Amino acid sequence: MKRTETYLLNMGPQHPSTHGVLQVKLTLDGERILKAEPVLGYLHRGIEKLMESRTYFQCLPYTDRLDYISSMNNNFGFAMAVEELAGIEVPRRAEFIRVIMAELNRINSHLIGIGTLANDLGASTGMLYCFRDREYILDIFNEVCGARQTFHYIRIGGVAGDFTDKARELTEAFLERVPKFLSEYDQLLTGNEIFTRRIIGISAMTAKEALDLNMTGPNLRATGVARDLRKLDGYSVYGELDFDIPVGEHGDNWDRYQVKMKEMAESAKIIRQCLDKMPEGLIMAKVPKMLKPPKGEVYSRTEGTRGELGFYIVSDGTTKPYRVHIRRPSFVNMQGLDLMCRGMLIGDSVSAYSSIDPIMGEVDC
Amino acid sequence: MKQRYLTAEELARIKGNFYTVSIDEEEKPPIYVSPEEFIPLMQLLKTNPRLLFTHLSCLTAVDWKDTIDVVYYLFSEYLGAYVVVKVKTIRNHPEIPSVTSVFPGAEFEEREVYDLMGVKFTGHPDMRRILMPEDFKGHPLRKDFKYEKPAPPKATRVSGEEEEADA
């Protein structure tokens, strides 16, 4: 009599395609995945606890290290939360600079997302192309704040340095490149049969499933739900800008890939408008050296590169926050991994990890 | 454009049949509810066609030294508003019903609160630590948590380098 049994396979935390230190316990029936259980915590640094013993200004650099690929967006989210708590008005020029930086960082992050997806499916050239184009964005960041990673550029009350003429020149040059490299990827990846057959129809999820699992960001929009906090909340100056929300249809890896590709074009559109509309003026509001926000709590959310990035801060009226909680989109999105992997082959689980695009620094916080 | 919070009058209408609901007169009034009535309240907020708070934005807990408050921020796209629900728990035995029956996507966040704050969620499908190792003692985000550093391993001379230098 034939007898079969399921067995357990550990993917990671050292597996090259698990993006950092993600461990996934796969329960397998032959090659098919019955259950995928992510094991988190390898990169847990206790940032929420550390923030309780730092002043608000000292907390800001820690946000760089959450999702280290999109540090600008994290700075932006935390600065907005503290400003709402303390009632600080940000100068208009600074708002435009912030939006430019956040959108550049979104392109940067999506480039890495797509590059690693290509790399994991065997197309190393795709990754090299993406990293080549990412260099141009890092040059702009280097010009405005002198760092290529962990920028600490968007501060409480404004931004750290002005958007110089050199930076504008670099940004204009980059915007000209965007349609070029997007069509290059289309040639390299979108029309590539080896690549498309690995992602079309793989790891599909419906809109209801994604909403039930509390997913946000490109992962949700790929299922056809046009929810983007930039439009919905219209925070900062997003309300004045004209852009579309790309959505998918089937919620499979292909749609997630396509949503990211289209979002890069939309981000470029936003940056173009910001460059045209940006007024002259101050870049920093008057912020007291000893910032003591009044007693109370605030929940402020922004559209990070991976979804809803929320900062919940409780103030007890002193210079240090009483409690900080960070709603990390990658962490919440990880709940979808089980559903995405179920019934797939082991090889397809790799494309599921890449297309869900988690950054472990953010998942583990 | 910031999203608004439900006002005290709107909340008073929701209060309806709930006995343990109390509402503070504040700018952003939170709803305080007892653990017994918590799940029916969340069910009402999510499914009532005039409310439709279908998105659980933020789930966390705050240690107030005598109690631990579990905080839920719900968002309704239909109303364009947040509502804040808080449940006070006793610090020695913090235990409240799990909201996963209403919002299945709260699973990881509840595990995180359990791990770091020590609040038990009854009826949760998989109540284990998520970030800290399984054999970890204590709950680090509590205010009285003290981390005891494990004793450093005794320094031992590994190679004979120094001896060679002496010679």
Image (tube, coloured by chain):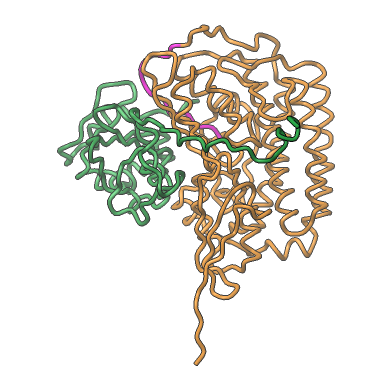
What x and y, as percent, mark residue A209?
Answer: 47, 57
In this orientation, which residue lies closer to the viewer: A123 or A302? A123
B34 falls in the magenta region: no
For the point 60% across and 32% down, which residue is it? A65
* A304 sits left or right of A190 in the view: left
For the point 52% across and 50% down, which residue is it? A334
Q: Is residue B8 above or below residue A257?
A: above
What x and y, as percent, mark residue A169?
Answer: 83, 22
Color used for chain A? orange
Color used for chain B? green
In this orientation, which residue lies closer to the viewer: B85 or A21? A21
- The image quarter containing residue A23 is bottom right
**Count of number-bearing discs:** 0
For the point 38% across and 30% down, which residue is it? B146
What x and y, as percent, mark residue A131?
Answer: 79, 42
What x and y, as percent, mark residue B143?
Answer: 35, 28
The magenta stretch is A292-303
Q: In the current view of this chain or complex, which residue is farthest to the front?
A: B167
For the point 77% across and 37% down, which residue is it? A134
A302 falls in the magenta region: yes
Q: Is residue A62 above or below residue A360?
A: above
* A77 sits left or right of B78 in the view: right
Q: In the current view of this chain or complex, which residue is farthest to the left?
A: B19
Q: Is residue B144 above or below residue A206?
A: above
Q: Main secondary structure of the magenta part?
A: strand
* A335 sits left or right of A284 in the view: left
